[in-house]
Image (tube, rainbow, N blue to C red):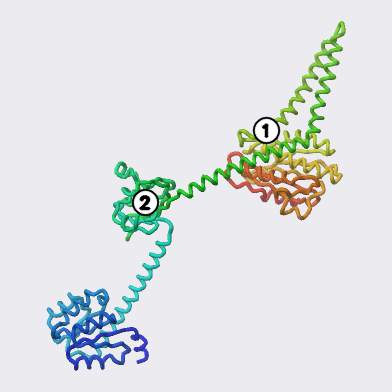
Amino acid sequence: MTEAVCENSEVTVLLVDDNPQNLKVLYETLKDKGYRLLIANEGEKALDLAHRHQPEVILLDIMMPEMDGYEVCQRLKADPQTADCAVVFLSALDDLQAKVKGFNLGGADYISKPFQSQEVIARVKTHARVIRLERELQARNRELQGDQARILNSISEGIYGLDENGIIEFANPAAGEIAGVPVDELIGRNFFDTHFATASDNPDGLPVQMTCRQGQAEGQRDIRMLRMDGSGFPAEYRATPKLDNDELHGAVVVFRDITAELESERELQEARELVQEQRDQLAHTSRLTTMGEMAAGFAHEVNQPLTAITNYARVAKRMMGKESPDLSLLQETLDKIEAQSHRASEIIRRIRRFMKKPATGKEVLSVPALLEDTRQFAEVDMRNNEGGIEVTFDEDLPEVVADPIQVQQVALNLIRNALEATRSADSSVPVEVSARLAGNSCVRVEVRDHGVGLPEEAEEKLFHPFYTTKDEGMGIGLATCRSLIQAQGGEIGFERPEDGGARFFFTLPVAGAEGEPCKASDSAAESKSES
């Protein structure tokens, strides 16, 4: 009995019969089975009890005065509160017509009088279990529908459910908000006529059309959609086919207004352009600062050929003043004047090229030629620091894509730092500048010195703005170098060789491989740093 009570404790059974003896028999039969039993001896009372308690099972006598069981069943099924109750008819009528009529009115079963106790128990148990499971399923479905509705209501993107002709069958609140009308006004409208001005002119070329008609998923960004008031807005949408057993029933469309997003992207692009402009300005300022530091050396560098030109010109004048000038010697002297003028012109040309702002941006470069030009440019520092520079590079080194002025600025900065570090350590070993292929998509340029090395605390801060290891440094050189190399699509860093000094390096993308990663470290680099 305990098991029966536990199983049936939530089940209510309504017993309806105008015969007290029949009610007593039914009650005695079911009272120990754990059911909650309700009793009614006429139709109106049965309807009232059923409406208030929603029993799972109703044992209903057909032959009753005033209101028979058929009418009671009909009214029970018409009331949403009691429509799901399992009505089991009780009657001494055993003809087929009586049973068919009962089933047509919504009856679930039929028990003939006189009934057997075991039959009543078995049928009540079966129907109670079925109804309870159905109600649990309905409750779960309602819960899921509620969860689904809450989820759809909380989504900020508009969602439409369309049939194969584009008629809106479902819309969430966000869709109504974007369209500018209540959701109810969207249901039943044609999606294409509602949101696209060209729907009547171009019925086969509209967004979502292929999804509705052919089941092809699609999506677009920054298309123009219309609100109900006729105003337009830029939108992004995704459309997926609505399938049932591989049969196409329309489409589900998720869309959103991207007006604010496009505005943010525009502002971000403007900010990036401003940052790039400021970065270029800072790089130019850094080059001017470098030229200021090197001005005395360059003045001396230019003064040498000018002095030579002056001296050769005086010699030429004296030779021309003779009665029989040596024309071959005069020609040689004039050739020397021309050579020295070219030398001075080349120095000035190199300075002007280095100081100007980039105009054409990135181009295809030969790294060996660029490094040799940089080495010549650094000769002033080389003499001032009583050091040397050795440039080596792999044969068949591929060309790179970069801004030549900015790359030369980085290389010159690293070389000048290396020369100063070498002088500080009283070392006579020249600065080693090299270039080699790193992987398949990068050229790695290294500047190696045998100077005093870098302090341990420089590890994390070396490329940060305003950090410097020099007594009179401003701390913008390496920070600018990092910015410039990253703008080329490469990386910059440094290593600590085991035999002292420092090795700075940067990478540049090989021409034709700009879209591939160009990392500063690779297996080749690691093996070299360990040697």
| Amino acid type of the residue that numbered disc 1 sits on in the rendered structure | Lys
Element marked by disc 2: loop
Q: Nearer the viewer, residue 234 or 346?
A: 234
| Count of numbered badges drawn on the protein | 2
Q: Nearer the viewer, residue 244 or 357?
A: 357
How far across and how far down the image is residue 387, in percent?
83, 39
Instruction: Specify the farthest residue to the top.
Output: 323
Expressed as whole percent of the image width and height from the top left, the position of residue 346 reads: 74, 27
- The answer to whether residue 444 is seen in the rendering is yes
85 or 257, which is in the foreground? 257
Write down the residue under mark 1. 356
Image side of residue 261 versus residue 99, left or right:
right
Looking at the rendering, in which quadrant would you find the N terminus? bottom left
Residue 248 in sight in this render: no
Which residue is under mark 2? 216
Q: Residue at x 22, y 87 (%)?
A: 40
